[in-house]
Amino acid sequence: MKTNKNFFAKLFTREYRSRLISFLIIILGYIVIELLMATGNLSSMFQSLLVPVTCYIVAALGLNLNVGVSGELNLGQAGFMCIGAFAGVCISGALAGVISNGIIRLIIAIIIGALLASLFGILIGIPVLKLQGDYLAIVTLAFGEIIKSLINNVYVGFDSNGFQFSFVENKLKLAPGGKALISGPMGATGTQRIATFTVGVILILAALTIIYNLIYSRSGRAIQACRDNRIAAESVGIHVANTKMLAFVVSAALAGAAGALYGLNYTTLIPSKFGFNLSILILVYVVLGGLGNMTGTIISTIVLVLLPELLRGLQDYRMIIYSVILILTMILSNNEKVKTFAAGLRKKLTRNRTKEAAADE
Amino acid sequence: MSENKIPVLEVIDLGIDFGGLTAVNDFNLKVYNNEIVGLIGPNGAGKTTVFNMLTKVYQPSRGTIKFCGQDTARMSVVEMNKAGIARTFQNIRLFSNMSVIDNVKIGMNNQITYNNVEAVLRLPKYREQEAKVTEEAMELLRIFGLDKDADLIAGNLPYGAQRRLEIARAMATKPKLLLLDEPAAGMNPQETADLMDMIRFVRDHFHIAILLIEHDMKLVMGICERISVLNYGMLLAEGTPAEIQANPQVIKAYLGE
Ligand SMILES: Nc1ncnc2c1ncn2[C@@H]1O[C@H](COP(=O)(O)OP(=O)(O)O)[C@@H](O)[C@H]1O
Ligand SMILES: [Mg+2]
C-alpha cells in the first residue's frame, strides 16, 4: 500500500494539484457539452461560442505565462492571434486541393500559425527584452495595431504558381483556377470552416501541458526568478533577456495557434476583429483569473465570454451589469479582508483533509 | 600564504566614480584558495561598491580584477558567476515568491543540461537531472539548517533564515569564491554563532575562498585569517585580526577623533 500512498501524496503537491484541477475542468466541461449537444440541449448561440472560447483560453493561458509568470506586460496578444488566423486561413486554402482531410489541414494550419507568430515574437523580443521597464507593453501595443493595418491592406491569392501577394486589389493576377484568400479590409472570404470544438479542447490540454511542464523545469524556475529579482537572477548566472524571451515566444506561439483555430471557424474573417480591444480583453481574463494561475485563467475566460450572452435577456442593461461585475470582482479579489477570509477557508479545508488522512491511518 | 601560488582573486588599483564622487580608489586585494578574508570599514566606506565591481554589477572606472589569473575586464554579471564568483546581498535579494528549495535549484540552473523540449516531454534526461538537482538542493538546505522549510515560500522565512538561504543559493552555483555582504546583519548572538560555524564548514567542506563584509567584530575577528580595512573608498590597512585590532589608524577610523 506504500507506493499507492506515495502516488496520492504526489497528486496533492502544489505542482500536481493545480494541474489536476485545470485538466479536470476542461475534460469534464468537454464531456458535459458533448452530452448536451448529443441530446440537442445546447442552443445554437452557445454552440457558436464553443470554438471561440477554446481559442480565447489558449491565447489567455499563453499570455499568463508572459504576464503572470514572467512579469512582462504584453498588450499585443491579438496581433499574434491575427498572424496565426490569416496564416492559418492561407495555408488551409492553399492545401485544400492537396489534403482533403479537414482535421489534418487544421493541425498543419495551427502549427504554421504558431511558428509564424513565434517568429514575430523573436523579432520583437530581440531588441525589446534587453531593456528594463515597460517597453514590451508599448512595442507589443504598436505591433498589434501594425499587423492589423497591414492585413487590412494586403491581397493574397493562391494559384498554380503558389502564393501571390499585392497591396493593390486589381494587381493580384491569378492564373485560371486560382483563388483569392485575403482581400484587404474584407479579410479572408470563402474559408472552409474546418475548426472543431474537439481540436480546440485538445489544443487547450496541449497548452496546459506545455505551460505546466515548462514552469516546473529549469527554464520555468529561471523565468520566475527573473520576475522576482532581476539582479539576483543575474548573480546566479541566469541570462535575463534570453529567459524572458522564452516566456514571450511561447506566449506568442500559443496565440498564433489559437488564432489559426479561430480563423478557420468562420467563412469570412476581417482583420479588425484582432484590434487593441481583443488584446485588452484577453489581458482581463488573465488578470481576473489571477497572475500565474492557469486554472483561474480558464475559469475567468469561460465566465467572461458567457456572461454577456447569459445577460442577453436584460437587453440594454447587459453591458452595464457586465462592467459592474468586472469592477466588483477586481475590487473584491484585491481586498485584504476577502483575501484573509479565502486563505482561512483554504486552511480549514486542508486541515479537514489532513484530519481525514490521519483518521485513515 | 605562499607568494608563488596564483590567488583566486587579485584586485589591482581598482577604482570607481559616480559622477563627481570617487566612491572607491586604488583598492588592492588578494584572496587565496581556502582563505576567509574580511573586508571591514565604517558605513559608506565603499565595501558594497567593491562587491558590486567584483561581480560587474558596476563597471569599474579604473584598475584590474583578475579571477584565477584571468583578466575579467570584458565579463558581465552572468559571466562572472559562471567563472566562479557567487555572492549574497546586503539588502536580501531572494526570489521571494518562490519556494525555498526552488531558490536553491535556481543556483544550479547552469549545471542542468536538459533542454526545453526534453522538459516539456518529461523525457528520462529531465527526470534524472531533476531528481539529482532536488537531492543536491536538499543537501545544501541541510547544511544551512533549512531542510524543514524546503517547501515554504522564501519571502515568508524569518530574517536570519533568509540570510542563510541566500548563502545556500550562492553555494548552489558551485563557486570558487563566495562574497558575503553583512551575512550576520539582523541576527541575534546565537544565530551569529551558528552562522560562524556554517561559514567555516562551507570553506572546509567545499574548499573555496570566502570574502566577507561584516560589522560584527566578534564574527570578523573569529573567522577571518586576514582583514582589509576600507575607509573613504581607500585601503586603510590590511593584516591578521591581531594586527588590525592593534592598528592605531583603524582604531581612529572606527572611534573617530
Ligand atoms: N549607484 C551609486 N550611485 C551613486 N553613488 C553610489 C552608488 N553606489 C554607491 N554609491 C556611493 O558610494 C559610497 C559607498 O557606498 P557603499 O559601497 O554602499 O558603502 P558600504 O561600505 O557601507 O557598503 C557611498 O557614498 C554611496 O553613496
Ligand atoms: Mg554596504
Image: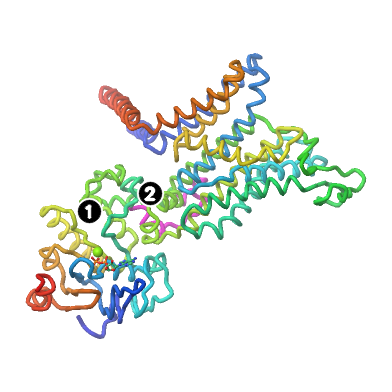
Q: Earlier in the sequence, mark 1 or mark 2?
A: 2
C-alpha separation, residue under disc 1 versus residue under disc 2: 20 Å
Q: Would residue A165 be visible to someone looking at this image?
A: no
Binning the other alpha carbons within 10 Å of mark 2 as few (below 14), some (14 to 19) or many (20 upward) gives: few
Whether residue B207 is situated above or below residue B108 in the rendered picture: below
Q: Tell me the quarter of the picture where residue B50 sits.
A: bottom left
> Does residue B88 appear to the left or right of A238 in the view shown?
left
Q: Secondary structure at mark 1?
A: loop
* Subunit that carries the residue with mark 1: B
Within the displayed image, which quadrant is ligand 2 positioned in?
Answer: bottom left
Q: Would residue A224 be visible to someone looking at this image?
A: yes
The image shows residue A94 at horizontal and vertical percentages of 79, 44
Type of amino acid under label 1: Phe
The image shows residue A232 at horizontal and vertical percentages of 36, 57
Residue wearing tag 2 = B131
Q: Secondary structure at mark 2?
A: helix
On whether residue B109 falls in the magenta region, the answer is yes
* Subunit that carries the residue with mark 2: B
The image shows residue B21 at horizontal and vertical percentages of 31, 73
Magenta stretch? B104-126
Quadrant of the drawing holding the C terminus of chain A: top left
Residue wearing tag 1 = B144
Whether residue A298 is situated above or below residue B69 in the rendered picture: above
